[in-house]
Amino acid sequence: MMDSERYNIQVSVESHFIEKESNPEQSRYVFAYTVTMVNQGSIPAKLLTRHWVISDAEGRTQEVRGEGVVGEQPYLQPGEGFRYTSGTILDTPLGVMQGAYQMVADDGEHFDAVIAPFRLVDPRVLH
């Protein structure tokens, strides 16, 4: 059983539409997202891999898996945080991303830091 007192990485995300890199005529919508993760647990942990599920407004889904984030595998002491910005491209002006980071604690326990669903929105499509 997981001990949320020991293993607890809080993840929050802010997304932004990048108008100057997007081209709606070519169904190209570019979004940036900034992730902030904070170790709220009592034991240090390292991010090993990431798993994203990205869905557009027409129900197309892509999964992205890989090592680390932005070329790093942050190691977080209790109370420490890590922030990074990355991006994705959709064919539609609306979408949703969600996923998880696979973590390993200093005691060898593997656990997921869940990334709750967040929206990708071109504000020009909202009236």
Image (spheres, grey):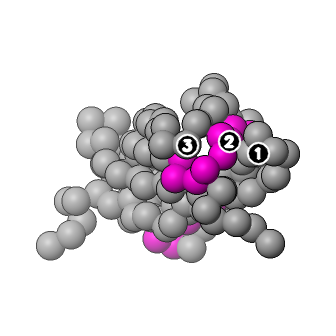
Mark 3–mark 1 Cα distance, whole angstroms, equals: 13 Å
Q: Residue at x 76, y 40 (%)?
A: 106
What amino acid type is highlighted by mark number 2? Ala
Q: Is residue 59 above or below residue 65?
A: below
Horizontally, residue 84 falls left or right of residue 53, namely left
| Quadrant housing the C terminus | bottom left
Label at residue 104 = 1
Mark 3 vs mark 2, foreground winner is: 3
Mark 1–mark 2 Cα distance, whole angstroms, equals: 5 Å
Which residue occupies the extreme right position in the image?
108
Callout 1 touching callout 2 (CB < 8 Å)? yes
SS under mark 1:
strand
Mark 3 vs mark 1, foreground winner is: 3
Q: Earlier in the sequence, mark 3 or mark 2?
A: 2
What amino acid type is highlighted by mark number 1? Val
Q: Residue at x 80, y 72 (%)?
A: 1
Q: Earlier in the sequence, mark 1 or mark 2?
A: 2
Q: Position of residue 75 (x, y in %)?
A: 63, 32
Q: Earlier in the sequence, mark 3 or mark 1?
A: 3
Viewer-closest of 88 and 34: 34
The range drawn in magenta is 39-58
Horizontally, residue 68 falls left or right of residue 118, namely right
Residue 55 colored in magenta in the image: yes
Label at residue 78 = 3
Query: Badge 2, how many Cα within 10 Å: few under 14, some, many 20+?
Result: many
SS under mark 2:
strand
Q: Position of residue 14 (x, y in %)?
A: 35, 52
Residue that numbered label 2 is attached to:
45
